[in-house]
Amino acid sequence: MIALIGGRTTAAFAAVIVVATLVFSSFPTNAGDATVGVDVDVGVGVGVDVGTVNDCDNDGVGCGDLIMLEDFTSPRHEWNEMNDPVMGGKSTGTFSVDKDRGVGVFNGKVEIVSFLNAPGFIKAETETLYDDDEPWPDVSTCEGLQLIVKSSTSPSYKGFRVSFGNARPPDAMHYTYGYKTDLHLQEDDNNDNKFQQVKLPFEEFTDNWNAGTGDAVVTCAENKEFCPDIASKKDLYSIAVWGEGVEGNVDLQIQSISAYGCNSDSTSSSVSSSSIVEDEEDYESSGDDDAITIEDFSSSKSSPPINTWRTMNDPVMGGRSKSSVTIEDGFASFKGTCAIVPFLHAPGFITMTTGAHGIFHKAPAIFPDVSNCKALKLTVRTNDVDNGYDGYYVSFGTDRVPGGHHAQGYKTHLEKDKIQFQGEKFGDIVLPFSDFSSNWSDSTGKTKVSCKDDSTFCPSIATLKDMKTMSFWGEGVEGEVALDIQYIGAVGCVSNSNNSEEEIQIDAADVAAGMVVGGGGNNNNGGNLPLCVAGMVASCAAAAIIILGLFAAHARRRNGTSRLTKKSNYEEVKQVSFDVDFDVEDEVTV
């Protein structure tokens, strides 16, 4: 082929391959964006786009069903107005419901806070719901919020914002909560000040915003960690409208607030468990070669445990639970009583724990990197002859749900039916990392939103690299605790030395099974590995064609011969082309 084409055509052909190389190289990788955006066809699931606002008509046709959240013709919630509480704040506002017109009226003025020399804020927010109040509807299958509004101060006033929920990123100020986005009204060309329909996709909200200005610090598009999670959409907690960060007069009249693009089918935005969780038997039958030891108490006779283990009991006022930990005879014995806390009229908790906890226990624990593993393996038994206690839990890590209080780490339930009785041999329990969730109740220990329902709450890569803490619990169930622990390890581990494409590429199963990147990404760009390889192959082929083509052209000039001339007709050229058999995959080995 090279000898046939030669000369200028060779250079042109090589140029085409070089251009193809650049095209292959221009495809983005998956680095830093593994939590969502994984383009895997697993149904409506974690990181899978279920539709955009641009797919919808202006009247909402094609967007799915609407779920009404607040209709001011008959409001469901109490609304309270609040002004900037900062020292020197002078902003003022009011919120009232005009029942005759069926609108909520938000008026006021945002002033400069003299102490900060910057604009303050005013906001109107629904009251926090109590147990006997009507709960917010579940909008986790919807695309965003829709407001029917108008304003006499827009578009000149550009400080309108909308927020919902009580989530906050780690280390945020306590009064900085909720997912927030800007509210922009269209300019009214006719000056007739009609009501407008404004759609705010959930993907435009973020809980990482500046407490002083209200502006987004990190958007949902920039880091999926700050996007609204399923738990917050299942229970909105509250909705607020703001005039913030911009000095000026505020006027906003609201007819209704609803969620649009809602999927009324039974399919929710969660991945089915069958698509993300490997069978526990796969790990139980695996050998020791794919296991990593975290703590082995069976060797305590000859050498002490890796970490120091101690007990912690419920610190709540009046807590009466008590516990002890002893390590001898090749196992750790965790015993105690989980008692009713009189003040709460509910069971407390006891723990066997290691690692730093608060200001009283700062000693760090040593944990291996298990980020390439799939599950936790425990070798345990119980002293409970009746096997009736069902309040055993295990947890690890220090991550908290945004807006959370005492609950930290990733926790799962140890089902009593899986624990061996004393008198029998110790039994193995395998807990896939997808069974653990950071969204659990700090009063009962039970999971509120599972990793399978929302990958936001799956163990992060950073935590799996260093768990920092681990605890065994007797929690939320009154009774006697008696648990013997012989071994703690991780199984289903893959060696870093074998970087096959299967190990490198992130798929939806890895995401939901616990391989979720916390705070950025895992710099994994295996998703486009085939394109990178194709680019490399094309580069090598282009270089070879140019060099050989130059040699061929030089030889022809010396011999004065050529297979093709300017007089060659189309049929000759086509026939020569069909005679050529050049397959890059056959010729190049990567």
Image (tube, rainbow, N blue to C red):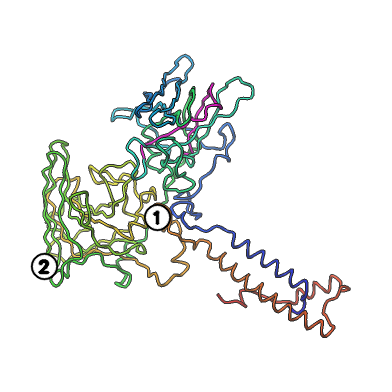
Chain part drawn in magenta: 141-167
Number of numbered discs? 2
Q: Position of residue 522 (x, y in %)?
A: 42, 58
Whether residue 265 appears in magenta in the rendering, the answer is no
Foreground residue among 372 and 170 = 170
Q: Of callouts 1 and 2, which one flags the residue occurring earlier in the amino acid sequence?
A: 2
Q: Which residue is mark 2?
A: 329
As measured in the structure, the alpha-carbon distance from the residue carrying label 1 to the one carrying label 2 is 38 Å
Foreground residue among 402 and 42 = 402
Quarter residue 397 falls in: bottom left
Q: Is residue 504 at least partly visible in the picture?
A: yes
Label drawn at residue 516: 1
Q: Is residue 306 left or right of residue 194?
A: left
Residue at 58%, 58% (x, y): give it.
Answer: 27
Dot 2: within a 10 Å radius of its alpha carbon, few (fewer than 14), some, or many (20 or more) residues?
Answer: few
Quarter residue 119 falls in: top left
Q: Position of residue 288 (x, y in %)?
A: 29, 72
Residue at 12%, 63% (x, y): give it.
Answer: 327
